């Protein structure tokens, strides 16, 4: 049930016909993991915390660097050299003391993700690394946990949701068959404009709130592409693509 204080704090979203107290109660029960608290993870975590997601796990082994402050909006100049998850947890808890933040000061590994996935309802992949993205997807698929992935380079960003709770969900390899060749590209080595991360991170948080509230998504099995130079969105529906592994599994059913 929602307390009188929560009813006031979340009143502007509770009054929406799509949300209501039922959706708010679902958010309060939700356990969400944000992997990577950088340019995307900062706005994602902030909007999920202020929206009243019950438990937010933050996973990042990095410390704040001076060059992060141009885009990683949770961090202040006096946070430089301090652990990101600790600083982020402080900021988020100040924004909303009613919810639980669990900082994990470490990089996500397959083993660690697998042992922690049993108590997670939704993963937000806010990393900038193809290798760990594949690992996150594999663990989410094995544990039937939905994942919302996003990335931004330069002025352009992309976003997609895969809901592994659904028996026919495509996997990461179905959607990105050439991901092997893209390894190594990351925000560390290429430039990125801060507000494009804000746009994509906000879209990622919006999809997360809708998924947890049980609303329809615009990014389910659909790659949403944002071009910051022209402010244009494009969408590619990829749900019917099947990688070899998934095609074999599907044939096996018949
Ligand atoms: Zn597949």
Image (spheres, rainbow, N blue to C red):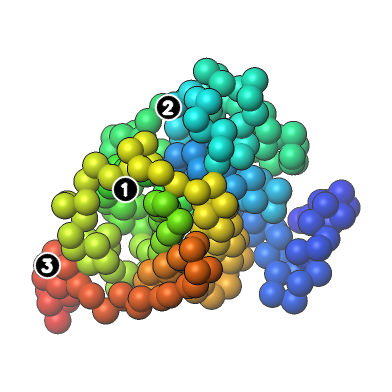
Comparing marks 1 and 3, which lies closer to the viewer? 1
Q: Distance from label 2 to label 1 (Cα)?
A: 16 Å
Q: Does label 3 point to a residue whose CB lies under 8 Å from ligand 1?
A: yes
Q: Is residue 145 visible?
A: yes
Mark nearer the N terminus (1 vs 3): 1
Mark 2 residue's CB less than 8 Å from ligand 1: no
Question: Residue 234 appears in which quarter of the rendering?
Answer: bottom left
Q: Earlier in the sequence, mark 2 or mark 3?
A: 2
Q: What is the quadrant of the N terminus in the image?
A: bottom right
Secondary structure at badge 1 equals helix
Residue that mark 1 sits on: 133
Q: Residue furthest top?
A: 81
The image shows residue 209, relative to residue 235, as above or below, that is above
Residue lying at 31% horizontally and 34% vertically, measured from the top left: 109
Residue at 24% x, 42% y is 184
User: Of residues 158 and 93, which is closer to you in this image?
Assistant: 158
Considering only vertical position in the picture, is 240 above or below 93? Answer: below
């Amino acid at each position: 049930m929602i307390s009188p204080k929560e009813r006031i704090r979340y009143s502007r979203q509770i009054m929406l016909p799509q949300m209501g107290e039922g959706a708010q109660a679902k958010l309060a029960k939700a356990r969400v993991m944000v992997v990577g608290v950088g340019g995307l993870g900062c706005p994602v975590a902030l909007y999920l915390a202020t929206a009243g997601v019950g438990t937010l796990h933050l996973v990042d082994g990095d410390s704040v660097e001076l060059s992060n402050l141009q885009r990683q909006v949770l961090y202040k100049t006096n946070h430089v050299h301090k652990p990101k998850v600790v600083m982020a947890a402080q900021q988020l808890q100040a924004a909303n003391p009613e919810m639980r933040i669990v900082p994990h000061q470490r990089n996500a590994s397959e083993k660690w993700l697998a042992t922690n996935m049993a108590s997670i309802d939704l993963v937000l992949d806010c990393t900038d690394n193809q290798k760990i993205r594949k690992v996150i997807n594999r663990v989410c698929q094995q544990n039937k946990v939905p994942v919302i992935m996003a990335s931004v380079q330069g002025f352009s960003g992309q976003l997609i949701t895969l809901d592994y709770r659904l028996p026919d969900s495509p996997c990461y390899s179905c959607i990105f068959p050439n991901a092997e060749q893209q390894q190594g590209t990351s925000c560390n080595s290429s430039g990125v404009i801060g507000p494009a991360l804000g746009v994509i991170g906000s879209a990622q948080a919006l999809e997360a709130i809708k998924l947890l509230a049980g609303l329809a998504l615009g990014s389910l099995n659909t790659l949403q592409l944002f071009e910051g130079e022209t402010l244009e969105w494009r969408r590619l529906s990829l749900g019917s693509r099947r990688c070899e592994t998934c095609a074999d599994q599907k044939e096996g059913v018949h």
